Image: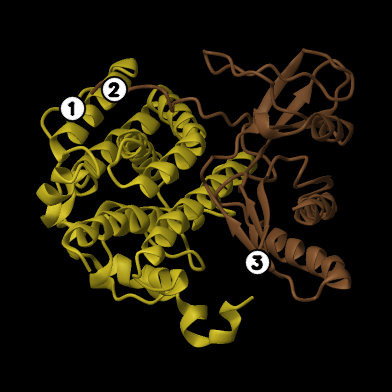
Amino acid sequence: MPEILNAEQEILRLLQGVTDPEMPFISIVELGMVDEVKVEDYEIFVRLLPTFSGCPALDMIKGDVIRKVKNEINKLDDSLDIQVEFSFNPPWTTDRISEDGRIKLKRNGITPPPVSHREDGAWEMDCPYCDSTYVTLDNIFGPTACRSILYCNECNNPFEAMKPVANIHEKVDVKW
Amino acid sequence: MTQENKYICELLYQLADDNFIHSYRGSEWLGLAPHIEEDVAFSSINQDTMGHAAMYYQLLEQLGEGEINDLSHNRSTGAFRNAILLEKVNGPGNYLEEPEYDWAFTVVRHLFFAVFKSIRLESLKQSSYEPLTHAAVKIHSEQYYHLMHWKTWFRQLMTSTEEAREKMEAAIHRVWGEFEGVISLGKYSQEISDLHLIATEEELRAEWLKRLHQLFTEVNFSIEGKPDMISGNGRNGEHTADLTEALAVLTEVYTSDEEAVAW
């Protein structure tokens, strides 16, 4: 068992090197996209959670995972096969982004999503450059499905923010 | 195939094909939308919507209906189960030659469908078919932004100039005349609802009417009676030449070069 555990940890370490092709500064681990890593019967199984369902980067990410993990693991044991699966259960939500991930987003001019979701659905997004709260939402839909475009009226910089995605309606009973 | 799976597939085709063709019609606005910000937003919405179609096709693939690319690109017009309203062209002309697309029709069609899609997803979250509940949860979290977007356009155009109001009202009447085709669950409606895969047509229609009338009140508009399906019921494989034309464009690469598909 310890060997398997080590293998799983090693794979997780390798996945740290797989980035989102549209945000190459953040890894899929930091984004919270990795749901499960398992080694069983000479097969590595990785389950990933897509951020947005129409994300065109999914195939690239999958290819990257297979390539990076295979290259390294095969040096140790070339009998291991790898399988990568995307799953919508559990759904990816923005609270899965790690603290390191949030710091990296901000450092790259993208305000991380609010930690908690407000009841009325309102966002609180501060400028990633000067931390001002005096900002305007220009377009909910930004350059990728998961980002929005905002403007800081304090330091006059345009910036982006990650759209908050929460499982907000799950517990609501349908009344009709 | 078991009888139950047959009805699950029937519903999945409706969901997949609706999103597929709706996304395609939306994507035909690329570069033509009223302004650059809308171009970005609409593209993003269409991309999400195509992702939703892919999720439903994937569920069909898992039920042994065939490979996902074939399901979307290699079926005849009559095999499609989307509502006719969603296949209709955006307006005269075509994307490459003199596209005189109708923005009012687009806003109304998208808003009415977005309202219905939210209701449908709320119901699907409680479906007796578990994989459908997971897909619905995921799709609903994205749909939230789409609905917000189309409500904004609707409110603004309904309360701006006289010309805009006239165009919007004409579009509402046109979409109203077809919307029953979106609500319909087709000829297996009873079986689909009996299996608790989704709420009944009556429940879906009542909730949709309620939410739309609320929106109409906000902009001082009213309409009598129930929606209709003048051009026929796409859930039963009835379609217009608009779908045949759309599929020909959509599948051009797929059918001409198999290797190109494997990119």
Q: Which residue is mark 1?
A: B223
* Residue B231 image position (x, y, % from top left): 16, 56
Q: What is the CA distance from the residue labelled 3 to the residue labelled 1?
A: 64 Å
Judge depth for marks 3 and 1 and give the one in front: 3
* For discs 3 and 2, the disc positioned in front in the rendered view: 3
Residue B193 in sight here: yes
Q: Colour of chain B?
A: yellow
Q: Is residue B118 left or right of residue B141?
A: left
Chain A: drawing colour = brown
Chain at tag 2: B
| Residue plotted at (34% across, 41% down) | B113
Q: Nearer the viewer, residue B37 or A86?
A: A86
Determine crowd level at label 3: few under 14, some 14-19, many 20+ residues with C-alpha closer than 10 A.
few
User: Dot 3 corresponds to which residue?
Assistant: A41
| Coordinates of residue A62 in the picture (x, y in percent) | 68, 61
- Residue A138 bears which disc, if any? none
Image check: B222 left or right of B153? left
- Amino acid type assigned to the residue bearing label 1 in the image: Ile
Residue B89 appearing in the image? no
